[in-house]
Image (cartoon, coloured by chain):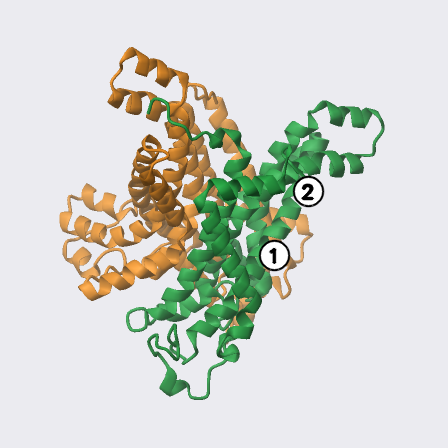
Chain colours: A orange, B green
Amino acid sequence: MPLSLGYLARRAVWSLAVVVGVAVLSYLVIILSPGDPAAKWAGHPRGPGAARAVELARGELGLDLPIPVQVLNFLRMVLTGDLGLSIAYRQPVYSVLWRNLAATLELLLVAYAIGVPLGSLLGVLAALNRGRRIDGALQAAGTLLANTPTFWLGLAIFASLLPLGFAAYGRVSTGLALSTGFRPITGLYLLDALLQLNFPVFFDALVRLLPPALAVAAYPTGVCLRVGRALMADALLEDYVRAAAAWGVTRRIIVWRYAFRATLPGLVQVSGLAFAYSLVDAMVVEYVFGREGLGRLLYDAVSVSDFRLAVGLLVVVAAFYLVVNTLADAAQALIDPRVRL
Amino acid sequence: MSWGGERLGSLVGRAWRGSARFRAGVAMSLLILALAAVGPLVAPHPSEGMGQVPPDAAERAGRPPSLEFPMGTDSLGRDVLSRVLMGARLALVQVGTVVALSLAVGLLVGVLAAYYRGLVEAALTYATEVFLALPAIVVALALRLALGQGFHTLVLSLILSWWPWYARASFVYARSVVEMDYVLLARLAGVPDRIILLRHVLRNVVQPVLVQAITDLGSVLLEASAINFLGLGLEPDAPDWGIIAQNGFKYVTSMPWISLFPGLFILLTALGFSLVGDALREGLDPRLRRRWRLWF
């Protein structure tokens, strides 16, 4: 297997270093922007307890200490998973984040399970017909899908489903979840419902998930269509394809087992890159569909200037991004024998 | 300026002749540029376009598209056409500022890292990786809390998350240029670093990165309007397409036209830049030029 534990260990250390960098940066944003850092950390409190809250925040950040010590203090808070209570949710920041990250992850995974295969297949279709009209049409469709504003697409889907009496709002019907005794385990509701063999909740969650997932899937579909078409067109011109054709290997085997196989590493790489980009799309679409998730947090954090949540979000999203990149590279090493990590 | 051994004119000319999508992209981009230039002059209600609520708001609110209001009016009675027209210039100013400044920072970092190696390279690579892990929308939240709403927050958050892409790309190109013999010879001849960097390295790196930047104008607009849509960027009355779509969000079933038209314009602009950039990139890359069909 061309993937070594040493590589993964080095990658983990490097990722940790990057997360530390992100945390230091977010601390500098709190300290260096105009205004009292303690008041910011406390969420600009108002009312009778305000002065005490600011004093507490001053203690947490250690604002009378030298800056490097403050940064180290703050890093300890970030890395031990204790950023205090989120002001918007009155719960520990990290537990709010994990719960919502699971919701966003579920949306992204389903969207990619739709978008990547669909886009790749259409890309193969375009490459097999390159130069013909259908190729031009498919490529145009790919560019269109990759350039549609996702929030707008989500709005359009949402608005066109409503008159059909289809209110796909939220993640799952609360009444249904309560009456069937559904309990979240992993936070991925589809998986949780399957684990509990709770099919009503599974279908309810799926039906609510599909419309936003389609909106998020537009981007990966477009990207995979375009990249898949380019890679496949290259692969079809390779000598080994010509040799196979000369040997009389059937078309189906040449296309799928020889040419398409060669496009897989490239498709995996580009999907990994797009996945991180789609995180933004997922956040916006969640907001449109009123789903729980990281997008909701963005919105809720602003209204009460929840700095702790913002910092936690930066750290968690950066970590998420690094994990996805590592997984994409590892997957590439596993399917492409030329890549050794 | 030499563009990979050929003049820019011939690159554009070939793209123009060879690709209908390039011609369509140029047409869309020119349309948006024209709107940005004359938008404020031809908008029927410029003050409403800038967000002012008209005096007869109550009776004008929520009108569907008609001859008087070709794109309808929003929930506060403002003419959506005027708002969308005023938005063209704002959209281009936003993406132009973001891409230009990100390019400047990214090119500088990438070229310096490739040229100086050692500690400089390590530090700059680390910085690039850190910023690469930060999506603009989350940076926008932090800056929105720290600096408040406005143009500066939006532009800064996008620059912070876009420059590393250019740094990474220009580092790759610059690294291959730095290893060329003429750079070594220039160094041995005692040419100052500043001159080598500007005249020999940067010049050969700018071109492919610049072509990428044209495509990115569209991607930046998509991201900027998403940030504005969530209310993390510009002020709520700014004539930004994302904000106009946000204004229509609450009324999406009763007044769908408020969100429909600004979204179409975002799509049109992003598509135009993307088509132009992609066709130029295909023209630059000889591998992508092959179009013939031999066996399949």
Estimate how packed mark 2 is, as few (under 14), some (14 to 19) or many (20 or more) residues with alpha carbons within 10 Å.
Answer: some
Query: Could you tell me if the residues under marks 1 and 2 are in contact, i.e. CB atoms within 8 Å?
Result: no
Question: As drawn, is A247 to the left or to the right of B88?
Answer: left
State the residue at coordinates (29%, 44%).
Answer: A110
The amino acid sitting under disc 1 is Thr
Q: Position of residue B91 (x, y in %)?
A: 53, 61
Question: Do circles 1 and 2 both sit on a common chain?
Answer: yes
Say which of B6 and A320 sits in front.
B6
**In the rendered image, which quarter is residue A261 located in?**
top left
How far across and down, in percent of the image, does residue A190 sit?
24, 46
Quadrant where the C terminus of chain B is found in the figure:
top left
Q: Farthest residue in the top direction?
A: A247
Chain ID at mark 1: B
Q: Give the number of the disc on residue B97.
A: 1
Give the amino acid type for the residue marked by disc 2 in the picture. Leu
Q: Which residue is drawn at 33% across and 61% down?
A: A155
* Chain on which label 2 sits: B
Determine whether the residue tagged by mark 1 lies in a helix, strand or loop: helix
The furthest residue to the front? B17
What is the x, y in percent for residue B66? 35, 77
Residue B206 seen from this side: yes
Q: Position of residue B18 (x, y in %)?
A: 48, 39
Relative vertical location of residue B193 with respect to residue A172 in this rendering, above or below: above
- Which dot marks residue B108? 2
Q: Can residue A91 be seen in this view?
A: no
Asked which secondary structure carries label 2, the reply is helix
Tell me the mark number nearer the camera, choosing from 1 and 2: 1
| Distance of label 1 from label 2 (alpha carbons) | 17 Å
Q: Residue at x 56, y 46 (%)?
A: B213
Q: Is residue B185 above or below residue A187?
A: above
